[in-house]
Amino acid sequence: MSQLLVQERDIVIPGEALAEGLDYLPGENAYREENKIYSKVLGLVSLLNRVIKLTPLSGPYIPRDGDKIIGVIFDIAMSGWRIDTGTAYPAMLNVKDSTNRFVRRNEDLSKILAVGDYVVVKIVQVTSQKLIDVIMKEPGLYRLSGGRIIKIHNQKVPRVIGKQGSMISLIKDKTGCSITVGQNGLIWIKGTPESELLAEKAIRLIENRSHEDGLTDKVSVFLENNKVVIQDGI
């Protein structure tokens, strides 16, 4: 007889039994051994019908094709820019993938993107040697200007974004800030100094209490109790 040994949003440790029997299926970060399903990681339980998956609560960011990340330019080469991704592995942004406008052969690339500039880019390839290629000429990819950059644990990014973007939309609406979340855990916030600070505090609240139920309501109450005046034209 099958038996579920955990509940939605339980925190489990590596090797902990999650279910017995064949009625349940191991999802992401879970595995089956004989008649039981076990956890591979320290993580948060998520149940979808008969599938048990886990969201890790620790571990470094692992670059993946298609991820949108925020990085900072740290070097300019002949063919483009090298970007610090916040991991052990830098990314390469080639000139041809940076802009839709024509770039002359001997053009000063620092006039387009300079060392120290933060950019939103998309990973298009990660090789087996962890060489990362990115692009910046699709909608939603750009050089960041103004605002502040904060860093959270990359495993908390899904909670900050929320289902179908619900959580980050709530923070944007309540603070009036422009916010971009990178899968590598870097987040850009732009608004008034007061609204930026409030948005950061809300994000920190999510990061610290990501394992709790009803988090959206808690964040909404927090933002309501700490309203700032939203100014147009930010």
Image (cartoon, helix red, strand yellow):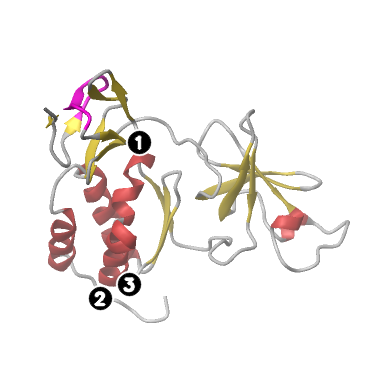
Answer whether labels 1 and 2 touch (C-beta < 8 Å): no
How many other residues sit within 10 Å of disc 1, few (<14), some (14-19) or many (≥20)?
some
Classify 10 Å Cα crowding around label 2: few (below 14), some (14-19), many (20 and above): few
Q: Which residue is mark 3?
A: 176
* Distance between mark 1 and mark 2 Cα atoms: 42 Å
The amino acid on which the numbered mark 2 sits, given as a three-letter code, is Val
Q: Secondary structure at mark 1?
A: loop
Q: Is residue 211 above or below residue 16?
A: below
Q: Earlier in the sequence, mark 3 or mark 2?
A: 3
The residue tagged 1 is: 28
Residue indicated by mark 2 = 229
Q: Which residues are magenta?
A: 12-22
Residue at position x 15%, y 45% from top? Answer: 212
In screen coordinates, is 137 left or right of 181?
Answer: right
Residue nearer the viewer, 81 or 122: 122
Q: What x and y, as percent, mark residue 104?
A: 86, 62
Please tell me which residue is depicted at 13% across the width and 54% down the height of the picture: 214
Q: Amino acid at mark 3?
A: Gly
